[in-house]
Amino acid sequence: MPFPAQDLLRCPVCEGPWDAARSSERSLVCVGGHRFDAARQGYVNFLTGRGTRFVPDTADMVAARDRFLSAGHYAPIAAALADAAAGVLAAPPANDGGTHRAARPGPRAVLDAGAGTGYYLSAVLERAVGSPAVALDLSPHALRRAAKLPRTAAIVWDLWRPLPLRDACVDVVLDVFAPRNLPEFARVLRPGGLLCVVTPLPEHLAELRGALPLLEVPAGKVHEVARAAAQDFEAVAARPVRIPLELDEESAADVALMGPAGHHSSREAVLAGLTRGTIHATAAVELSVLRRR
């Protein structure tokens, strides 16, 4: 069997295609001889040599995220993403009216840039039967979970580098609370494909900021997405998603520790700043849907 979504990927060293005769479901070998073996948990680390200057999420941060997301707190965000992507992913392969077929035949494909555990990607794939996917993230701990998704290549990668995907090979790109490498998103998306970006609004978790080490969200961050993407994308829709949350102190600690605070805050210190009992807050994000020109 081939490696999942193998035909969407390219060698991160030479950007060449894979040697089908030497590759397998457990390893990728390009025509130039560069080899990448899957870890026991199924993901592949493409960050060889110098690696990256960025720090990946730790096992504890990923565990906090997995607990929080598995409890369904952000399920409306996942549902909004699945709704946005469903129309494109359910469509047959694109053509120009019958005179030329698409360069990449087969099911529509998805890239989740900054996939984490694959929570949002899973919701999208449930509505896209047969679609292959690539999950990119810096954290091997997160990708151990994402690698369990069907037809999904889970790849350790730095999103600020050229992405290890072929040109115009995917139909939907997901970017949820993750870095946005817009030129590379435009390169790997086919014309007419969708970029779905989830960005926090200024009031996101505002009720918790006095007690938890959470970053402020600057005003105008959402509008910057469309402005920065205008060269290659046209805006299709902008949908705010607001979710009333009722959290116990453990879940409130998870929402802090699954983000940047997890790199420098202990669980004990975070819990010490929280009151006991039910904690009320509001998750507030905007889903921006943009179409590749």
Image (tube, rainbow, N blue to C red):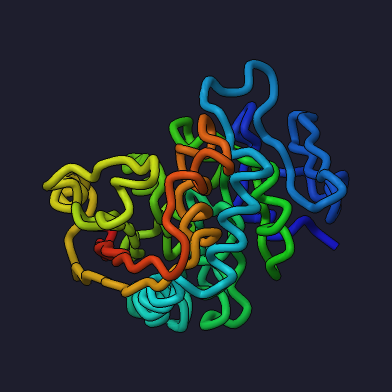
Res 48 quadrant in image: top right
Q: Position of residue 247 (x, y in %)?
A: 45, 68
The residue drawn where x is 23% and y is 45% is 217
Residue 214, visible in the rendered structure: yes
Is any atom of residue 99 visible in this view?
A: no
In the image, taking residue 212 as reference, residue 276 lies left or right, namely: right
Residue 83 on image: x %, y %? 38, 80
The residue under the point 68% across, 43% down is: 59
Residue 188 picture location, percent across and down? 44, 50
Residue at 50% from the left image edge and 56% from the top image edge:
112
The image shows residue 36 at horizontal and vertical percentages of 78, 37
Using the image as rendered, state which of residue 228 and residue 243 is in the foreground: 243
In the image, is 105 to the left or to the right of 199?
right
| Front residue of 161 and 288 | 288
- The quadrant of the picture occupied by the C terminus is bottom left
State the residue lying farthest toward the top.
50
- Does 284 sit left or right of 267 as displayed? left
The answer to whether 283 is drawn above or below residue 262 in the figure is below
Q: Nearer the viewer, residue 229 or 28?
A: 229
Q: Residue at x 18, y 46 (%)?
A: 221
* In the depicted structure, whether residue 82 falls above or below residue 223: below
Quadrant holding the N terminus: bottom right
In depth, the one of 163 and 286 nearer the eye is: 286
